[in-house]
Image (tube, rainbow, N blue to C red):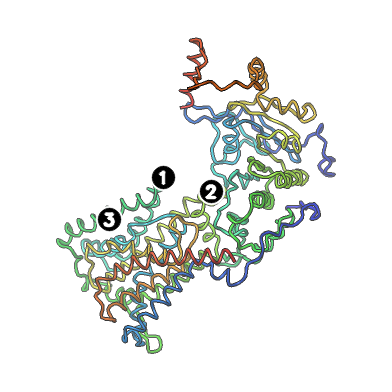
Amino acid sequence: MTASIETGIEMPDNPTTPILELMDVGKSYGNVHAVRGVNITVRQGEVTCVLGDNGAGKSTLIKVIAGLHDYTDGEMRVNGEIRHFPSPRVALSSGIATVYQDLALAPLMSVWRNFFLGNEMHKGILGTLDTKSMKRICGTELSKMGIVIPDLDRPVARLSGGQRQCLAIARAIYFGAKVIILDEPTAALGVKQSGVVLKYIVKARDAGLGVIFITHNPHHAYLVGSHFIILKLGRVVLDEHRDRLTLEQLTTEMSGGQELADLSHELESMDPAKVVAPTQGKAHVAAPELSRDELAEVVAEEKETE
Amino acid sequence: MATTTVDPNQNPTDDRVGARSLSARTLSRPEIGALLGAIAVAILFLAVAPAFREVPTVGTILYQSATIGIMTVPVSLLMIGGEFDLSAGVAVTSSGLATALITWEFGLNVWTGVGIGLVVSLAIGAFNGWILHLTGLHSFLVTLGSFFILQGANLGLTQAIAGGVSSPNLQNVQGWDSAQSFFAGSVTIGSLPLQVPILFWIVLVIIGAYVLLRTRVGNWIFAVGGDAEAARAAGVPVFWVKMGLFMAVGFCAWLLGMHMLFNYNNVQSGNGVGNEFIYIIAAVIGGCLLDGGLGSVIGGAIGALIFGMTQLGITYAGWDPDWFKAFLGAMLLLATVVNLIVRKKADQK
């Protein structure tokens, strides 16, 4: 096991020590349980993919790990120690960095100021910013990712989505993150830019980081993931290593599994290819007839969403 | 630390974003609009007001500008940090009144009163910051509330303690003379007599500009104003940055309040109302965005200079000073539009 760390060779059957462990973690807002009983183990040199539909509890889970919210049940261990993060700053200093969907970049600030935001280099008794070094390092780190921005004084708002994503990831890695949480990094990107980001995820893994990759795209997840967790309605519904899962299974699970099968069975009895001749006069669409139980269910569901 | 490397051949460089010329970068600086405005105003009054051309006038203009500029420094920083302070105008009066009334009521040394005035001013700033944090309301609302509270308290407490609308005269109290020469004295540089507030102003502008552009706190101020959530996520202590900014407004209100007290020997309890807008307008002319994230301390200082020149220029030119406010409004609109156009042009280059 020790040898595997030293040589940097990936040995999935012989995993390294967990760096971040969530045991039965839950988070409630009043009487709303956003996530319940979540168990996740993040190891160095592994990409843990967390998948889930909108509202499955992915965001809440990130906020708990990143220190934006404290959890209400269970325990979270970092390097074996039970931790509660009072602020993102504490999480960061424990080596957990998060790249948010909105990237946590200040749009009007320059590239290099954003890169060093919260970690500014300074020198002298007056704490003068070491502007020259910061620009140099920022330029080097970005070109490592294959982005060349000639004018680092340019405001971040003028960069492309992929460039901003890479800036945020490069920043997290440069500042010594042990665990890096990527919140839907490919959601807003085109095919080519997604590819760049996915490549960078692999690089981060090979550099010995524990990567948590949050996404709702099973194809992207399967390209880079070592371990997959699917959340649904705040609970873990699938927790499987890559070896015991195919892309088809993952896609099916992700898109609803049994629910999708039911829906497909239901829709099969109808003919989607059927073309109905337009009726004369006013079209009349009748609501499907519901039994009393079904109606009660719909009403309850509506109330819930309110 | 970061040992990752990406083969450059795998990622062809993206050359769509090119470097920008020096002129484009200069023109996109936030203070450029204010600078153009200041030059225009100076040319205007140099042409129409002969008294404007005399050397001693420089000292008078600078003094007039300093009484605005001392407050414009923290107000600009606060606006870059994304917040307003509508109580900044009356807070100056509150500071002078607190010093005068407490010194009078308890028979203290003037310097003790000055110290208490500082504590009161910082507490007002801290109160604004704390209420803002506690309620999560917009600072416009929070400081509108404290503006009225202070305005009422200024009048009410002065009436109750001094029995009038102005603070009692402290000229015979121990410590007055030394405090007066510190806060309201003058120094002669060359043949030019300069009043002390001008020095305060210059020092504040230098400190403010330095903090904003060359320290990590300055980086945090930009970030907090640009996107407070992003700043928090990056590890910036958002609450303390805003708290510090509001307290900086308190500190400068104290400095100016002390000057007012010792320059005029007493403070009128109704003073200061409306000045908050002059500070905000000077900051906006100087390139501060209303919703934060961009601006300049130097720009704010130039904004204050424009007002100083105009206030005096109107008098020297023999115009009716009633028109000053109309000029203020026109200047605000003009400066904002010029800022916008110039920056757009520069960005296209």
| SS of the residue under disc 2 | helix
Same chain? Circles 3 and 2 = yes
| SS of the residue under disc 3 | helix
* Of the pair B247 and B53, the residue shown nearer to us: B53
| SS of the residue under disc 1 | loop
Q: Is residue A298 left or right of residue A185?
A: left
What's the residue type where badge 1 is placed? Answer: Gly
* x and y percentages locating residue B255 in the rendered image: 35, 67
Q: Which mark is residue B136?
A: 1
* Of the pair A130 and B226, the residue shown nearer to us: B226
Residue at the left extreme of this rendering: B163
Q: Which residue is mark 3?
A: B150
Q: Dot 3, crowdedness within 10 Å: few (<14), some or many (≥20)? A: some
* Of the pair A218 and A224, the residue shown nearer to us: A218
Chain letter of the residue beneath label 1 in the structure image: B
Chain letter of the residue beneath label 2 in the structure image: B
Q: Is residue B296 left or right of residue A13?
A: left
* Number of numbered discs visible in the structure rendering: 3
- Occupied quadrant, residue A265: top right
Viewer-nearest of labels 1 and 3? 1
Q: Which mark is residue B232?
A: 2
Residue at the front extreme of this rendering: A280
Instruction: Give the Cα distance between marks 1 and 3.
Output: 21 Å
State the quadrant of the C terminus of chain B.
Answer: bottom right
